[in-house]
Image (spheres, rainbow, N blue to C red):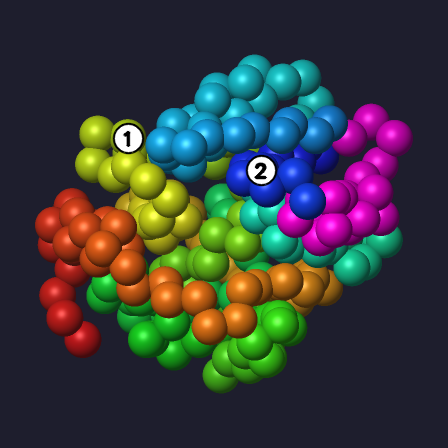
Amino acid sequence: MIAYACCVGSRATFARCAAPGLRRAMEPDSVLAEVTTEHSIHEAYNEVLAHFAGADGLEALVLLHEDTELLDPRFAEHVRRVLADPDVAIAGVVGARGVHRLEWWAGPVVGRLDETRGTVVGVAPAGDVDALDGLLLVLSPWAVRELRCDTATFTGFHAYDVDLCLQARAAGRRVVAHPFAVFHHATTGKDRLDAGFMAADAALQRKWGLAPA
């Protein structure tokens, strides 16, 4: 069974973007958790992880943003294919190697992402990375059992993706970008480097001892 979880801030955005893709990708036994929070996506996702950690027959947990649309009706086949390697803990659409800060895209990008702001094309279409963009994270059963968002260090809505990936890497597991067919209905011109982002970046660098590139 492949489970899905989406943190929903806007019902309209979810209905327009994520919901059609979920209907396209989910199988008859799939489960969907819709979570809401005005405080911390870290806490919300931890509730999801704790809920599914003991689920019988769990093959994967897919975390996605409300503005991420799954385009491929055979999405589940791709999930099973990439997680067939037991060393893979987390898979996503796009990420980077040599990550030294929360601005992971400053490193060599791997993967490809189509979104409203254009197309992100990495140095390779797929492969191992240090961190992934949280718009889509496919977690293996091991990751669901063993990884948790660090609510002691982070709050708000930034850094959970990079931190989870770094946790997996520190445990000796693989984090990979895979050519999942998705479309990101991103808000054009949105400033990602707000005060919350910068505070999360500083906390991430302190936690992991990241040195500037």
Going 49% across and 45% down the picture, which residue do you hit?
89
Q: Position of residue 142 (x, y in %)?
A: 50, 33
Q: Quadrant of residue 149?
A: top left
Within 10 Å of disc 2 (Cα), the crowding (few <14, some 14-19, many 20+) is many
Q: Regarding mark 2 in the picture, which secondary structure is present there?
A: loop
Question: Which secondary structure is most common in the magenta stretch?
Answer: helix
Can you see residue 90? yes
The answer to whether residue 195 is above or below residue 112 is above
Going 24% across and 63% down the picture, which residue do you hit?
101
Question: Is 106 on the left-hand or right-hand side of 32?
Answer: left
Q: How many marks overall?
A: 2
Q: Regarding mark 1 in the picture, which secondary structure is present there?
A: loop
Please name the amino acid that badge 1 sits on.
Thr
Please name the amino acid that badge 2 sits on.
Val
Q: Position of residue 170 (x, y in %)?
A: 29, 46
Q: Check disc 1 and report the residue beneath it.
A: 151
Quarter of the picture containing the C terminus is bottom left
* Front residue (pair 51, 90): 51
Is residue 15 rendered magenta in the image? yes
Question: Tag 2 or tag 1, which sits nearer the N-term?
Answer: 2
Residue span colored magenta: 13-30
Q: Position of residue 38 (x, y in %)?
A: 42, 33
The answer to whether residue 6 is above or below residue 44 is below
Q: Are marks 1 and 2 in contact (CB under 8 Å)?
A: no
Q: Quadrant of residue 178?
A: bottom right
Q: Position of residue 102 (x, y in %)?
A: 29, 60
Q: Which mark is residue 8?
A: 2
Q: CA distance from mark 1 to mark 2?
A: 19 Å
The answer to whether residue 4 is above or below residue 65 is above
